[in-house]
Amino acid sequence: ALAGADDSRAWGGRILNRRFAGGAVMYRVQLAEDVVVEVESSSGTAREGELVAVSASGGPFPIVPR
């Protein structure tokens, strides 16, 4: 899930891009130089280049090397 950039319980990152997928928005978020994650959200309010935080709940989560 996306959170505010000041959320200390989540990983900080920057939105690289977003795409609309029906009723959801898919965000690509760069957490570190070599770590990019995709986050699905029902809100499309975050913008490219914006600093955000990413938190994880549920799972399991697939890790796919590029």
Image: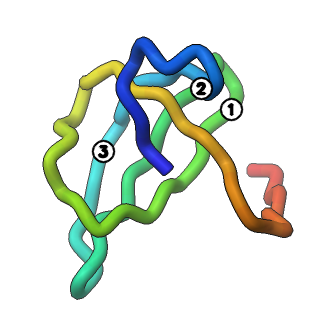
Residue shown at 21% from the left, 41% from the top: 46
Is the Cβ of the residue at disc 3 closer than 8 Å to that at disc 2? no
Residue at the spot 22% in from the left edge and 71% down from the top edge: 20
The part of the image, by quadrant, that contains residue 64 is bottom right
Vertical side of 33 occupied by 40: above or below: below
- 40 vs 51, left or right, is right
- Element type where label 1 sits in the image: strand
In the rendered structure, find residue 31 and report the number of the disc placed on it. 2
Q: Which mark is residue 35?
A: 1
When the figure is inspected, residue 2 is found, relative to residue 38, above or below; the finding is: above
Q: Amino acid at mark 3?
A: Asn
- Residue 5 placed where, x, y %? 40, 18
Looking at numbered disc 2 in the image, what kind of residue is underneath it? Leu
Residue lying at 54% horizontally and 37% vertically, measured from the top left: 54
- Is 50 situated left or right of 36 in this image? left
* Disc 1 to disc 2, C-alpha distance: 5 Å
According to the picture, the residue beneath numbered tag 3 turns out to be 17
Q: Are marks 1 and 2 in contact (CB under 8 Å)?
A: yes
Query: Where residue 36 sits in the image (x, y, percent)?
Result: 60, 39
Tell me the CA gap for discs 3 and 2: 13 Å
The x, y position of residue 25, in whole percent, is: 29, 66
